[in-house]
Image: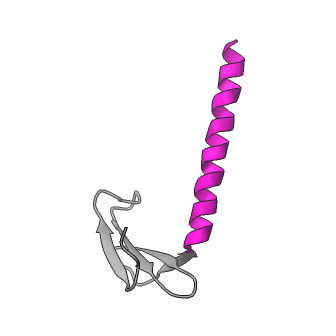
Amino acid sequence: MTTLNKKVTRKLPNSSDGHGRNLIVELTPGLTELIRIRDFGRRKWYAVPLLKVRQLGARLEAEDQMRQRKEKRRKK
C-alpha cells in the first residue's frame, strides 16, 4: 500500500451527477486526511475528513444489512 505523502487528484469517468458533469476527487494528506470533491468545470470544493467517509460507509452497510434481515423475516 502506498502512503499518502502528496495531493492526488483524479477525474472519475462516468460519474455524472445527473447534470452532465463528472466528479473530480482529491485526496489530501495532513493532520487530518481529507477527501475533496467538486464538479468538473466548477471551482467549489467540498472537503470531508476520511474518518467521516468511513463512518458513513459503515452506517450505510449496517442499514443495508438491517433491511435485508427485515425482508428475509417478511418472506417467512
Q: Which quadrant of the structure image shows residue 15?
A: bottom left
Residue at 69% in and 36% down:
66
In the image, residue 9 lies in the stretch drawn in magenta: no
Indicate the position of residue 42 as horizontal and vertical percent values.
38, 80
Indicate the position of residue 41 as horizontal and vertical percent values.
32, 78
Q: What secondary structure do most residues of the magenta stretch adopt? A: helix
Rendered position, 18 above or below 47: above
Rendered position, 52 above or below 66: below
Residue at 42% in and 77% down:
27
- Between 48 and 30, the one lying in front of the other is 30
- Between 43 and 24, the one lying in front of the other is 24
Q: Which quadrant of the structure image shows residue 12?
A: bottom left
Indicate the position of residue 1 as horizontal and vertical percent values.
37, 67
Q: Residue furthest top?
A: 76
Task: Report the side of 4 relative to 31 (left or right).
Answer: left
Residue at 66% in and 21% down:
72
Magenta residues span 49-76
Residue at 60% in and 46% down:
61
- Between 3 and 69, the one lying in front of the other is 3
One can see residue 22 in this view: yes
